[in-house]
Image: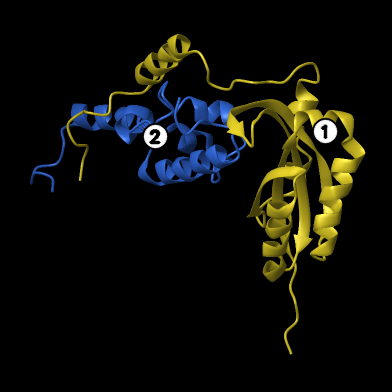
Chain colours: A blue, B yellow
């Protein structure tokens, strides 16, 4: 819950720029489906041991993180990505 | 009486690279046979890529991926997976619904077409290099720990 008083003009501007920046990488591109065959994109969301980065680390929104999770797991099954390294 | 509705599916088949290189038509024929046995109408069937596998599958470390789009009755998709499991020529298959795929999506060039020479293989191996990627990801992202925005 926010405070009673609305944000000042300066803060408002800061918030809008912040909001633009914080769109996740997939939302920015406007992608509705994350393809498990797009290994290069998924690779960036894995650690060197093949673990999935947290949302905080990858900057993904909740919805995209779920899609990424599914895509990575599909890619792992098809031996496109490692389960562990 | 039930009328069978055919849906569009996308299937990615994994076969051994050596087998695909020596008997390409035979492999395609096998896959086509599986699909036809399930009463599928094949929209497209082509090589997707040939790459090193992230882990060994049935002792094979290189694999050829074959991408197929087909219309099939939902109840018979299981039959394709069963055929693949019983087959010794096809290592794996992943069949997904592709209802939202457009014609252009299906005709997108595959990695094999984009990089005909050698495979476009970014498969993870060297641990040292991967560290850079990790740092990059962390650096590229906007700081997420700003004080909670409005709301």
Q: Residues within 10 Å of mark 2 (few under 14, many from 20)?
A: some
Kindly identify which chain the residue marked by label 2 belongs to.
A
> Which residue is identified by label 1?
B20
Kindly identify which chain the residue marked by label 1 belongs to.
B
Q: Is mark 1 in CB contact (under 8 Å) with mark 2? A: no
Reply above or below: A3 against A55. below
Q: Which residue is farthest bottom?
A: B1
| Residue A70 position within the rendered picture, expressed as x and y whole percent measured from the top left | 48, 45
Q: Which residue is farthest left?
A: A4
Quarter of the C terminus of chain A within the rendering? top left
Would residue B110 be seen by someone viewing this image from the given angle?
no
| Residue A33 position within the rendered picture, expressed as x and y whole percent measured from the top left | 55, 45
Reply above or below: A69 against B146. below
Tell me what residue is drawn at x 67 percent, y 57 percent: B99
> Which residue is identified by label 2?
A23
Find the distance from the CA under tag 1 to the CA under tag 2: 43 Å
- Mark 1 vs mark 2, foreground winner is 1
Q: Residues within 10 Å of mark 1 (few under 14, many from 20)?
A: many
Q: Nearer the viewer, residue B85 or A72?
A: B85
Q: Nearer the viewer, residue B41 or B14?
A: B14
Name the secondary structure under disc 2.
loop
Tell me what residue is drawn at x 51 percent, y 26 percent: A43
> On the rendered structure, is A82 left or right of B36?
left
Q: Nearer the viewer, residue B37 or A18?
A: B37
Q: Quadrant of residue A45?
A: top left
> On the rendered structure, is B149 left or right of B59?
left
């Amino acid at each position: 819950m926010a405070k009673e008083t609305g944000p000042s003009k300066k803060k408002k501007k800061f918030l809008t720029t912040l909001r633009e920046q914080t769109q996740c990488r997939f939302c920015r591109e406007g992608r509705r489906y994350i393809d498990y065959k797009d290994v290069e994109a998924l690779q960036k969301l894995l650690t060197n041991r093949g673990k999935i980065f947290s949302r905080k680390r990858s900057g993904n929104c909740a919805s995209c993180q779920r899609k990424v999770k599914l895509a990575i797991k599909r890619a792992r099954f098809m031996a496109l990505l490692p389960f562990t390294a | 009486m039930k009328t069978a509705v055919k849906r569009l599916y996308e299937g990615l088949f994994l076969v051994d690279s050596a087998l695909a290189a020596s008997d390409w038509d035979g492999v395609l024929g096998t896959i086509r046979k599986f699909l036809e046995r399930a009463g599928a109408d094949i929209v497209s069937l082509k090589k997707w890529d040939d790459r090193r596998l992230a882990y060994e599958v049935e002792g094979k470390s290189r694999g050829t991926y074959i991408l197929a789009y087909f219309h099939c009755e939902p109840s018979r998709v299981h039959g394709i997976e069963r055929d693949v499991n019983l087959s010794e020529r096809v290592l794996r298959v992943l069949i997904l619904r592709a209802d939202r795929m457009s014609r252009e999506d299906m005709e997108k060039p595959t990695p094999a077409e984009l990089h005909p020479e050698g495979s476009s293989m970014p498969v993870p191996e060297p641990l040292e290099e991967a560290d850079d990627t990790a740092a990059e990801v962390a650096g590229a992202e906007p700081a997420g720990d700003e004080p909670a925005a409005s709301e």
